[in-house]
Amino acid sequence: MRIPEWIKPAVWGGIFGAVAITIVGFSADWVVTTASASEQAEAKADQAVIAALTPVCVAQFKKAAQDSQQTHLAALEDQSSWLRGDYIEEHGWATMPGSNEPDDEVADACARELLKAS
């Protein structure tokens, strides 16, 4: 049996095309591995939790008296940007009901939200 001459270039073209599509697919994030999909899902879940708990932190802050709120906001503005979350944690606003410890990321988001609203 004789194989036609056009088969060999067609097979090589198919192989190179498959390799090219694989490289482009992975580099453009059209195709992801299970591990990277899990990482992306976990990051999205963390963002959703922070977004859901930040209003609770803000509400706990707003339970304070109005004059106390202004004092705390002024003190928060005076803090360095990387210490604002610590200030929120120290005052217990980032400690969620039913929890014993504050959440660092919620505290940072809460500080940003409070300063944005003031």
Image: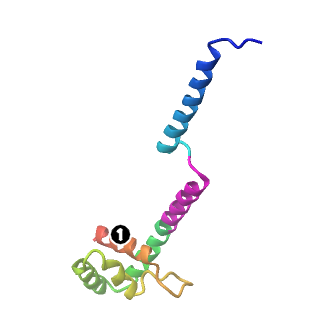
The image shows residue 114 at horizontal and vertical percentages of: 33, 73
Q: Nearer the viewer, residue 64 or 55?
A: 55
Q: Nearer the viewer, residue 76 or 13?
A: 13
Instruction: Give the residue displayed 44% in from the left and 80% down from the top.
Output: 94
| Quarter placement of the N terminus | top right
In the image, taking residue 50 as reference, residue 115 lies left or right, namely left
Q: Which residue is mark 1?
A: 113
The magenta stretch is: 32-49
Kind of residue sitting beneath label 1: Glu
Query: Viewer-proximal residue, 56 or 2?
Result: 2
Q: At 49% across and 86% down in the image, what residue appears? A: 101
Disc 1 crowd, CA 10 A, few/some/many (<14, 14-19, 20+): some
Is residue 36 highlighted in magenta? yes
Q: Position of residue 113 (x, y in %)?
A: 35, 69
For label 1, the SS is helix
Where residue 5 appears, as percent x and y from the top left, is 63, 12
Classify residue 13 as left or right of residue 108: right
Residue 53, given in percent of the width and then of the height, sits at 48, 72
Magenta: main secondary structure: helix
